[in-house]
Structure formats: structure tokens, C-alpha cells
């Protein structure tokens, strides 16, 4: 099944109905492009799979916090899962109602808790008894009551990458289930706090429903136990973490169709997940038929809806290895360097049928060996000046970008049907370097022979 969020048309790679080559000509490279059609499809599919259940889908902003992306989901009824005051502000600015916002995170500061209270959010996912104490103080001082879900650690191994697993007993996340239970039973009234629910999140990029089932069963057992003891719990938050297919291996399809197919693959996973959840909720033995539900999907909704487009600067043969040096680097997309993550690399011009592939190393310009996107990746012939796209770059990609090597952050474009919009401009050099300030002991004189533009920093300092 092909949905045509990504496709070759007349040999040119398109996102929705927009040729990526045309966007490259307009904004230069590298740039991110997201398909609003794919975003909307992903959200609707998830929402429909859960239809009939009293669920709030709180999109996990950390995956992609561009306000155009957030608003695309908000317009379809989504809430937001935020983990910092910055994300809270982005969610509110993009139009997410406060009553659909959950505030998660293991280290919220007093100021952040206050910002959440002032906004009137739906729920704080509290991760430690110390945080609960601080929230109680902040809320009491404001004369308000904070709605809370305790995030429990279910001690389940999510079977995902070591660096993104969160649900094991040795992880920094959540409160040990027994400790949470004992505390809640011993402290039924906490000033400024209303414990309304329990939450779990066991990790990211999960491709199997079995660990979810185990974690949710444990959460439900605790919920039932505490309700039985008279606690007025009413909400279960099942977190996020549903994985996507980064390796688009489907024989017989071209590279664009394989990227497109990955979107449909996610649908199959969502269906299995939703069926498992529905089974647990509707099972009368579990006694949770009337619980409100919260889901926090991030990657699932945005991952396969985005691509990073880059241009080949040089092709260099060094002994037996061929290096394709591109204008995107680890500062733009860090997942391959940080997690050894795989992103498909798709040429913007469709290779002719039967083109021989040859293994190449695809690397960026940053002065680190780890600035490597792919080693010995079989690709069709690639020449200097050619355009390539990394697929599955909608999640944890732009948001993890930095200006390392003083490379400005790349722009982001959203396409919908045949329309496109620049939803974040490329950072300009003045913005990037102009945030530095000279201390007064260096300010007095410019070093001999220095460029008069060195005065820039001084002028700006005066202007600020
Ligand atoms: N809820 C909580 C409490 C989380 O910690 C996370 C992700 C999510 C929801 C959303 O998870 P998702 O549905 O996107 O898997 N940078 C890594 C992923 C880190 C995920 C952190 N927490 C990567 O690039 O793979």
C-alpha cells in the first residue's frame, strides 16, 4: 500500500506534491522538509485506532517542536506532552489548550512547576517524592491544587536501544512501584496536591507490544489496588515510545516508495498496540473501564513524515574507500553519531532501473570522525552537486541540532498537497555569533590588524 507522502514523479523526489529539488533551489541546503499530509495521516490513524476509548493524545513535543507541526496536531484535537518550560511555552503558543497538556520530566525546577500551575495544565507527571514535596510547596504558596500522576517505574525491559530505554529498575526515571504505593497509602492528603493518576513510559523506539503489555498490566494492577484502598484515581497515562521503521527494506519498490511504505508499516504497529490496550481496558477483571487514558506518542507521529535534504560537496577516493562528503553534518542530524542510528539515504533523482550500487561512506564536514552518517552504504552513483535525502528525519532530528563548528541551524519547510511554507528560516550568521559578548577588559581595543567587522560585537552590545 502506498500513500504517496513521498514519491518519485517524473524521476524527481516529492514530499506530498512538492518537488524537493525546487525547495533546495529556494532555500539552499541542508534543510528539513515535513509532509503535513503524513503528519495528519499519522495522527488520525492513531486517534481512530483508539476511538471509543476516553483517550487524550498528548503529542510528545520533544520529537519535533516546530510550532507549525504542533499546531497541525492541535488542529486535529491533540494535546501535548512537555518536559520543560520552553516546551510548555511552545505548546501554548501553538494553540494547545492547557487542559490537554501533561508536564513530564525527571528534573522540573520550582519555576517550571509554577509555570505549569499558572497555565492550568491537565497533569504533572511526578517522578520523585522530592518533586512531589516541591510541587506541594509551590502549589500551596499559590493557593491552588496541582493535578498529579505519579510516574512509576514498572521494571520492564523495553528491548530497545540501551541509550533510550527508561523502564528498568536501574533507570533514572519514575518512582519504584512499591515505594509509590506505600507513600500514597500513608499520605492520603497532601497539601496542594491531588493525585489523579498513574503513568508509565518504558522507552522509545519499541517495535514489539509485549513489553508494553507487561508494563501496562503492572500499572493497572497498582491502579486497581490503590482504588480498592479508597484512593480517588481516575487516569492512566501509558506514555509514548511506539517505534517506526528506519530501514525501508521492501523488495521491488523504489527508494521513494519504500520511504512511503514505512508510514503504512507504522499503521500496522499502531493497530496491534491499540488492540492490546483496548483488550486491557475492556477486560472487566481489570476494573479500569472508566479510567481516562493519556498517550504520549512522539516519534510515531513525526518520524517518517520528515526528510533532511543535503547536497554532495565532494566525492573523494581514499585508497579502497569512497567518501561522499555532504553539506549536512552531525550538528544537523546527530542520531547516526550518537546512537549509531540508521537513516535511509535517497537520491532526489531516481536512478535508472538496474543501476549498479556501490558501497560508499557518507560523511559530513565537521572535524570529527564520528561525523559519519553511513559506512559502506550501497548507493547508486553519486556525483558532486547531487542532492540526497535522509529519510525518517522528522523526529529527534532538527530538535537535536546544534551550531557545533559554528554551523547555523538549518531551515524547516512544511508541505501540504502542492503548497509549501518555510516554518523556520535558516539561522543567519549574525544571530549565531551575535549572542557572544566581549568582557570589558577585551572591549577597549581591537587587536592590531583585526577586521573592522570585529566591532560588530561591540555595537551589538551597545544596542542590547
Ligand atoms: N513520554 C516520555 C515520558 C518520554 O520520555 C518520551 C521520550 C516520550 C513520551 C515520547 O517517546 P516516543 O513516542 O517519541 O518514542 N532522542 C532519542 C529518543 C529519546 C526519547 C526520549 N523520551 C532518539 O533520537 O531516538
Image (cartoon, grey):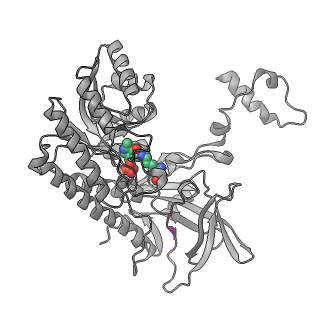
Does residue 335 lie above or below 129 as drawn? Answer: below
- Residue 1 visible? The answer is yes
**Residue at position x 34%, y 20% from top?**
136
Q: Position of residue 180 (x, y in %)?
A: 30, 33
Prevailing secondary structure of the magenta residues: loop
Is residue 224 or residue 198 the one in the foreground?
Answer: 224
Is residue 387 or residue 44 the one in the foreground?
Answer: 44
Tell me the quarter of the image containing the N terminus. bottom left
Q: Position of residue 408 (x, y in %)?
A: 62, 46
Tell me the quarter of the image containing the C terminus. top right
Does residue 288 lie above or below 41 as drawn? Answer: above
Does residue 244 lie above or below 294 as drawn? Answer: below
Q: Position of residue 331 (x, y in %)?
A: 60, 50
Give the side of residue 231 with respect to residue 207, left or right.
Answer: left
**Residue at position x 44%, y 40% from top?**
172
Q: Is residue 116 magenta?
A: no
- In the rendered image, the residue lying farthest to the right is 448
Is residue 441 or residue 18 the one in the foreground?
Answer: 441
- Residue 382 visible? The answer is no
Give the side of residue 448 with respect to residue 361, left or right.
Answer: right
Classify residue 75 by image quadrant.
top left
Magenta segment: 342-349
Amino acid at each position: 500500500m502506498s500513500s504517496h507522502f513521498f514519491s518519485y514523479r517524473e524521476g524527481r523526489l516529492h514530499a506530498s506534491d512538492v518537488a524537493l529539488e525546487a525547495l533546495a533551489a529556494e532555500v539552499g541546503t541542508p534543510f528539513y522538509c515535513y509532509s503535513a499530509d503524513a503528519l495528519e495521516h499519522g495522527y488520525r490513524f492513531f486517534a481512530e485506532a483508539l476511538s471509543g476509548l476516553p483517550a487524550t493524545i498528548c503529542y510528545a513535543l520533544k520529537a519535533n517542536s516546530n510550532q507549525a507541526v504542533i499546531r497541525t496536531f492541535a488542529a486535529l484535537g491533540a494535546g501535548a506532552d512537555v518536559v520543560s518550560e520552553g516546551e510548555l511555552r511552545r505548546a501554548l503558543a501553538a494553540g494547545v489548550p492547557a487542559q490537554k497538556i501533561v508536564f513530564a520530566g525527571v528534573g522540573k525546577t520550582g519555576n517550571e512547576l509554577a509555570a505549569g500551575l499558572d497555565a492550568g495544565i491537565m497533569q504533572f507527571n511526578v517522578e520523585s517524592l522530592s518533586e512531589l514535596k516541591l510541587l506541594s510547596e509551590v502549589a500551596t504558596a499559590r493557593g491552588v491544587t496541582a493535578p498529579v500522576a505519579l510516574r512509576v517505574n514498572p521494571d520492564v525491559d523495553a528491548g530497545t536501544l540501551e541509550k533510550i530505554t527508561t523502564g528498568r529498575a536501574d533507570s533514572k526515571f519514575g518512582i519504584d512501584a512499591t515505594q509509590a504505593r506505600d507513600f500514597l497509602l500513608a499520605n492520603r492528603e497532601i497539601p496542594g496536591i491531588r493525585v489523579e493518576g498513574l503513568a508509565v513510559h518504558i522507552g522509545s523506539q519499541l517495535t514489539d507490544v509485549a513489553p508494553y503489555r507487561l508494563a501496562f498490566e503492572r500499572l493497572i494492577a497498582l491502579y486497581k489496588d490503590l482504588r480498592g484502598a479508597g484512593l480517588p484515581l481516575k487516569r492512566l497515562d501509558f506514555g509514548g515510545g511506539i517505534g517506526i521503521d528506519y530501514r525501508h527494506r521492501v523488495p521491488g519498490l523504489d527508494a521513494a516508495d519504500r520511504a512511503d511504505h514505512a508510514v503504512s508499516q507504522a499503521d500496522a504497529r499502531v493497530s496491534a498496540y491499540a488492540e492490546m490496550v483496548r483488550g486491557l481496558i475492556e477486560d472487566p477483571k481489570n476494573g479500569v473501564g472508566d479510567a481516562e487514558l493519556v498517550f504520549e506518542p512522539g516519534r510515531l507521529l513525526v518520524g517518517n513524515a520528515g526528510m533532511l535534504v543535503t547536497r554532495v560537496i565532494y566525492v573523494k577516493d581514499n585508497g579502497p574507500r569512497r567518501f561522499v562528503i555532504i553539506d549536512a553534518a552531525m550538528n544537523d542530524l546527530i542520531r547516526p553519531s550518537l546512537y549509531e542510528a540508521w537513516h535511509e539515504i535517497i537520491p532526489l533523482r531516481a536512478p535508472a532501473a538496474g543501476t549498479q550500487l556501490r558501497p560508499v561512506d557518507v560523511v559530513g564536514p565537521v572535524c570529527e570522525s564520528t561525523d559519519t552518517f553511513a559506512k559502506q552504504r550501497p548507493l547508486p552513483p553519486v556525483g558532486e552537486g547531487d542532492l540526497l535525502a535522509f529519510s525518517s528525519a522528522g523526529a529527534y532530528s532538527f530538535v537535536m541540532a546544534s551550531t557545533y563548528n559554528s554551523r547555523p541551524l538549518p531551515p524547516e519547510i512544511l508541505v501540504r498537497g502542492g503548497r509549501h511554507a518555510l516554518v523556520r528560516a535558516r539561522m543567519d550568521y549574525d544571530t549565531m555569533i551575535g549572542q557572544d559578548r566581549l568582557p570589558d577588559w577585551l572591549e577597549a581595543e581591537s587587536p592590531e590588524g583585526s577586521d573592522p567587522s570585529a566591532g560588530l560585537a561591540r555595537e551589538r552590545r551597545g544596542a542590547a
